[in-house]
Amino acid sequence: MRVSKVPILASFAALLSLSVVYCGFPATFLSLERAFPPSHRVELDQLLARDRVRHARLLQNVAGGVVDFSVEGTSDPYLVGLYFTKVKLGSPPKEFNVQIDTGSDILWITCNSCSDCPQSSGLGIPLNFYDSLSSSTAGLIPCTDPMCTSSVQTSSTECSPQSNQCSYTFQYGDGSGTTGYYVSDALYFDMILGQSYITNSSAFVVFGCSTYQSGDLTKTDKAVDGIFGFGQGSLSVISQLSSRGMTPRVFSHCLKGDGNGGGILVLGEILEPSIVYSPLVPSQPHYNLNLQSITVNGQTLPIDPAAFTTSNGRGTIVDSGTTLSYLVEEAYDPFINAITSAASRTATPTISKGNQCYLVSTSLADVFPSVSLNFAGGASMVLKPEEYLMHTGFIESAALWCIGFQKVQGGVTILGDLVLKDKIFVYDLARQRIGWANYDCSMSVNVSVTSGKDEYINAGQLGKSSSSGDMLFKHLTSGTLIFLMHILWSSLARI
């Protein structure tokens, strides 16, 4: 898009006049020169190459800030059963609803060329499709790109010699899958720098364009536009942005469990005094924690600790893309027995659709015990009954509550949204640890980012399901004016 020089100069003159009033300095007029001579013909690929170099340089010079994403959805499998956020991609920007998934790395969006993908969603949201041809900033990733030829390559990365496109195939734990190709395009987001300084930011990121989907991804009842992977692999958005110094290597979420759900998702660190941390198991593709024991009503269950050891496809992972939670068989049976023993005095145990359930006529807190998952580093995760039970309906006047944990024969213990809801979770990739604390996710949170010198910069408060773009500027500082002048000079230089 061509930009008229006159409005930009007018805006810049207004900015200079504002700086005169604010700073008390006389205006200084600078001569401007074109980046390319008027008579010089410039090819599009030259302009794109120059812009990419410039974008990389700008990103390296930007201090890390907090990126705030809206959150929608709930953990209730009978309502939504997933949490999703919005991302803006391409030029002009187009908005997409994508599931928040800490169990995978890649951000991918459904391509307009996908013929068998859902065309509508039972979630009541419009489905949009990404079209690289309609974005002026889109670029395909060729086979010669380092991500297809270097150590970044993974088993899910492929190369098609016929099309010279770097492609992928992903399989998820529920049996669903997607195939597509990688593209590079602009991602737009709101960034908070300081107490009230909000700027519209963008960065080029590599993501997937899905041309084929299978399994549950083809169903329309909970269809979204894609999946936003928050894993720690090099191709995750959090890794791409933090590697350029644009965001810290930490992100946080607080997923609201009751009511209409929603919550908070930030690229930054939520600060809360009650947060406890446990170290991540090193060299793992997922967010693996060392679960050491489970206690019910303060009594440690008779479970061999080897059942939770991370090795040979076993271990314990944190995964926001999983609705329920899963326990290995060695832990599941003792867990069910302890819950049933504690609750059977005032609740009636029953089996419903193969699941252990209970008929309850009073409040859960009066019937069911507290559960504690105990991790390495002395960090315990205390679960209320609502965080290991699901309300599935009523039988006469009694509520039917069923165990939300599912049995896994061998394999991995997975802590899904059933457990993650109503808690702050901090994924501190820089320090290789995960922290959590029980929290009312309808309340605001304090968020900070860590600079290269480990100094904390307070980024103010964010509220549930609010976008930082909805916040108002409280004041303009001289630093703000300098930043805006820098942006305007940059725009003039590109004319």
Image (cartoon, helix red, strand yellow):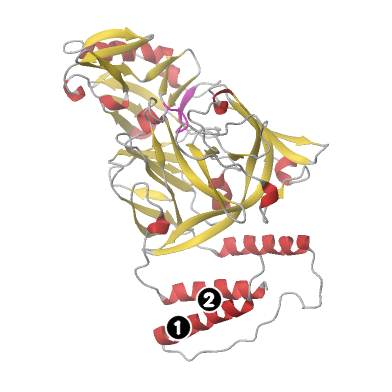
Q: Residue at x 59, y 64 (%)?
A: 58
80, 147: nearer the viewer: 80
Residue tagged by mark 1?
19
Q: Is residue 35 visible?
A: yes
Q: Is residue 375 left or right of residue 149?
A: left
- Residue 429 visible, this angle: no
Q: SS for tag 2?
A: helix
Left or right position of 28 against 259 = right
Q: Residue at x 49, y 80 (%)?
A: 15
Tell me which label, 2 or 1, sits earlier in the chain.
Answer: 1
Distance in Å between CA atoms under marks 2 and 1: 10 Å
What range is drawn magenta here? 315-323
Identified by mark 1, the residue type is Ser
Image coordinates for residue 193, horizontal then vertical, percent: 43, 62
What number is the disc on residue 485? 2
Taking the spot 53% from the left edge, 22% from the top edge, the residue there is 174
Asked where in the image residue 202 lies, by quadrant, the reply is: bottom right
Q: Residues within 10 Å of mark 2 (few under 14, many from 20)?
A: some
